[in-house]
Structure formats: structure tokens, C-alpha cells
Image (cartoon, rainbow, N blue to C red):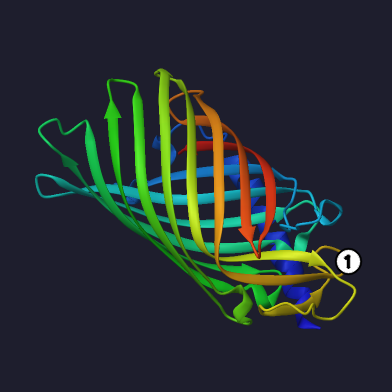
Amino acid sequence: MTKPSRHRRLTSFCFVAALFVLAAMAQPTRAQWPLWLGDWYPAVEIELKWDDNINRSIDGDGEKQDVVITPQLSLQTVQPLGDAWSANMKAYMEGAIHGQYRRLNYLAPGAIARVSRPLGLDDQRALVLAQVGLRYEFHEQDFRFGAEVNPRVGVQYRFGERVYSSLYYEYDNRFASENEIYDRTGHTFGLDLDVELAPEYGLEAGYSYRHGDVLVHEPTDTPAPNVPNRVFPVDNTFKSRYAALKFEDEETHRFYIGGYYAINLYTSVNLRLAYEDIRANNDSYPSQQILLTVTHLL
């Protein structure tokens, strides 16, 4: 009897968080925040995502579409470390609200710490950085609960005055608290490009390649499909009988293009179109996404 109650509380919290973010965006400047925040700068962000294959099914008839609202409230600071190095620290609270498949809703506190250093004589042209992210997701479903750690290293480089590039490597490791099929490890290599057309707007594109564990969902009429990988018992996450299949040492390719616009000094809008293709078990699991993100500095 306690599980449905907790689920309702989590969903309600996510909706309240979204309303809080919308209200906070109405605040015009950072000066209204109390002085005790010091060098910590608060921000709110709302991402609206449409995904045409949120369950990552191989069969077009088994694909499920959904819209996800992801509000995030964060505090971050940048501090110098000597003459060259600097540190960036961020703490945040994030939630996810799914339009149809609400058992995928979650609440996730997290933190990111990063150090960076300019390279070469022109300290504005190249930058090397290292960071680590930690988070814990409280899902509507107990077996999706889990902690995640994401260390990353990268190099950022500027070509001329308006073209920026970023090359990075990231390791992701997720520890599920209830069922090991939701454990995950992977290695990602990525390249991002940013072309600033004017001080307030620009275009961006990127590609990433990931090698590691992947999770897909397939319609099934049996309690557990006979596959050479671990399978979680069928549940009604997608309002019908689906099995979660975990494949190890597989590939994921992701491409995106987009643009951004700074409405003012405090608010910006980002729009991306993304395509993701999971190559697993000699099959392809593609998905397409539209992502709209609004960020506001308080």
C-alpha cells in the first residue's frame, strides 16, 4: 500500500518543481537573491523533449512516443585555482515528468565538479578540462532507482573569433539498487561544434560514439524471452507487456544539430534535433528527438 502513495508524492513533487521553475523565470535579475549566496549563482532550466521511440524498440509497431518535461534548479560557482587553473562546481535538483509513461518519472539530486586550464600563449584559444558528475535517481519504479558517476576529460578549441569545438571522452557507470539489469557502464567519445553567428545567437552540431551496455524494450507475450542476456520480468511501464533486455559491449551513435538564442543577459533558448541509433544484438534501435531548452540565470 505504501508504493502507490510514494509514487503519487514523487509525481506531485515533479509538477510542483516545474511550476516553481516557471515562477522563478519571471524574476528579472540575480540581484533579488539573498546576499548569503555569495559567489554561488542560481539558475533554472526547463527541457521539453519529444522522443519517437522512448522505449528503444526494434519493431516499429512496438515503438512508444512520449513528451518529457525536465525541470532543473541549480547553484554553481567558478573559483580561480592559482594563476592558471580554475574550478567550476555545480549542485542541482532535477526531475522528469512524462506525458504518458509516468512510471519513468524520476527525481535526481546531483553535483558536478570541473577544473580547467588554458593551453598555449593565447589563453583564450584552447582549454583543457576534467570533470566528474555524481547523481542519484529516485524513480517511480523501485527497480529503476540508481546512482551514477560520470568522469570526463576534454579539450576545447576556438577557431578564429566565432567557431568553437570541443573534443571529449566520458565514462559512465550506473549502479542500480534493485535489479542488476539497470546497471550500466560505457565509454563515450564526442565532438561538438558551435558557430556564433552574432553575439546573441548561433548554430551547433555534434556527434558521439558510445561503446558499452545498452537497455532496450521489446513487446512480448511470454514472461521472459529466451535471449542470451539478462531480462527483467515483464512490467506495465509502457501500458502493455514489454521485456527489458540488456546487451553488453554494444554501440550507440548519436547526431544532433541545433541553434540557440539569447533573449537577454539572463535567459536563453536552445532547440536541437537529434538522431540516436543503438546497434545491439545485430539489430538497429533508432530514435529521433526534438529538444527545446530554456535556461534562466537568477
Going by the image, does 77 lie left or right of 254?
left
User: Residue at point 72% right, 67% down?
Assistant: 9
Q: Give the quarter of the image for residue 16.
A: bottom right
In-front residue for pair 158/85: 158
Please indicate, yes or no, whether residue 40 appears anywhere in the rendered image. no
For residue 277, above or below residue 136:
above
For residue 34, above or below residue 131:
above
Please indicate, yes or no, whether residue 86 appears anywhere in the rendered image. yes
Residue 273 placed where, x, y %? 62, 35
- Does dot 1 land on a helix, a strand or a loop? loop
Residue 189 placed where, x, y %? 42, 51
Question: Pointer 1: residues within 10 angstroms few (<14), some, or many (20+)?
Answer: few
In-front residue for pair 135/189: 189
Residue farthest top in this picture: 198
User: Residue at point 81% right, 83% down?
Assistant: 1
Going by the image, does 189 lie left or right of 85?
right
Q: Amino acid at mark 1?
A: Ser
Residue at mark 1: 240
Residue 251 placed where, x, y %? 55, 58
User: Residue at point 22% right, 36% down?
Assistant: 126
Q: Give the quarter of the image for residue 29.
A: top left
For residue 263, above or below residue 153:
above
Quadrant placement of the C terminus: top left
Residue 174 placed where, x, y %? 51, 71
The count of marks equals 1
In-front residue for pair 178/61: 61
Going by the image, does 186 lie left or right of 182?
left
